[in-house]
Amino acid sequence: MNKRGKQTEEETCVLCFLNWCNKQHNRNYIYERAEARFTKLKGELRWDFIAYEPDNPQEWIGIEVKGASMLWEDSRRSEFWQKLCSELSADLEGRGIQGNFGLIYPPALDLKPGERLKFREAFVEVLCQKAPNMELNDLIDIGSDISNKFPSWPREKIKTLREYLEWGEYRPPKLRIAKRADSGCKVSLDGGRFRAGSLGQAHKEAFNEVFKLKDGAVQANEQLRLAEKMGAKMTILLLCCDAFVYEDLIEDPVQNLDRHLIPDIDCIYLVDMGTQVKDKVVKIYPG
């Protein structure tokens, strides 16, 4: 993400938070960049924003925004496939297919204009061929079958000698699908596996990214410590995320974080900027 894009997402995040805060507490907070008021901080390590009410600008809150890139990537992938699964379910109607089918952590797919319909056609054709031979809870990989019918299916670098001997340097990524019911006609994300598997790992990596130690300190705490020294009445860390983020997978490790690592952070909030719930904010620290 370039600098301008990062700044835009930070400002969107703080605006979501302040909209929520003003409604919850009947306040009138607005914001500005920290360096706009403290010009000598420009180009130095600093926190992101100052929030204050127009009638009392000298009493302000220091706010730092951290965007968890792993969460954005997996969240957007989840949202993309949720919508695509709805379209695939509609495509299967009237094709004589019976059963509910779950996709297990499908790969990232960047479809250009006009490719979405072609992918759907390839998927339906492959599933119509495979479904009649699938028993309840059968799990199969249809990635290579999709690749044969959809040239824009991505490729991934081979990691093992066995795969190299079979595919060469690159192979089509797996698209694993499980039959979860004999009745109905539906395609969906296999939620339990999605959450407990790679998505859970993504949350862990996102947490480590935000709270990793650098020179023995958490950077967000150092940034907000400076805000305290400059006169902030309160310091807040916002964890900026997208839709489909599981709060407990972030809240639990934050609650268990050594307090000595974040002594200058008064509160931590998870800010969901997704489209499902407008201005959704959850306080995750302190409990």
Image (cartoon, grey):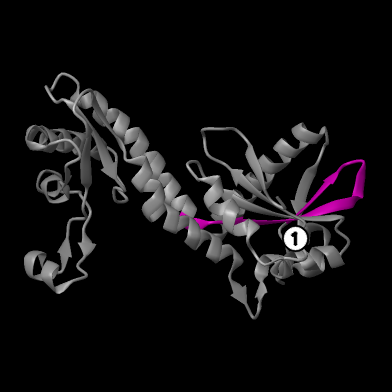
Answer above or below: position of 9 versus 170: above
- Amino acid type, mark 1: Ile
- Please report the bounds of the magenta region as a residue range: 49-70
- Does the magenta portion include 42? no
Q: Residue 280: x percent and y percent?
A: 62, 37
Relative side of 132 to 54, left or right? left
For label 1, count other residues whose C-alpha is less than 10 Å away and answer few (under 14), some (14-19) or many (20+): many
Q: Residue 270: x percent and y percent?
A: 62, 48
At 60% from the left and 52% from the top, the residue drawn is: 251
Tell me the element at label 1: loop
Q: Residue 221: x percent and y percent?
A: 71, 66
At 39% from the left and 43% from the top, the residue drawn is: 78
Answer above or below: position of 274 versus 73: above
Mark 1, residue position: 265
Q: Nearer the viewer, residue 191 or 69?
A: 191
Q: Residue 89: x percent and y percent?
A: 25, 27
Tell me if residue 1 can be seen.
no
Residue 100 quadrant: top left
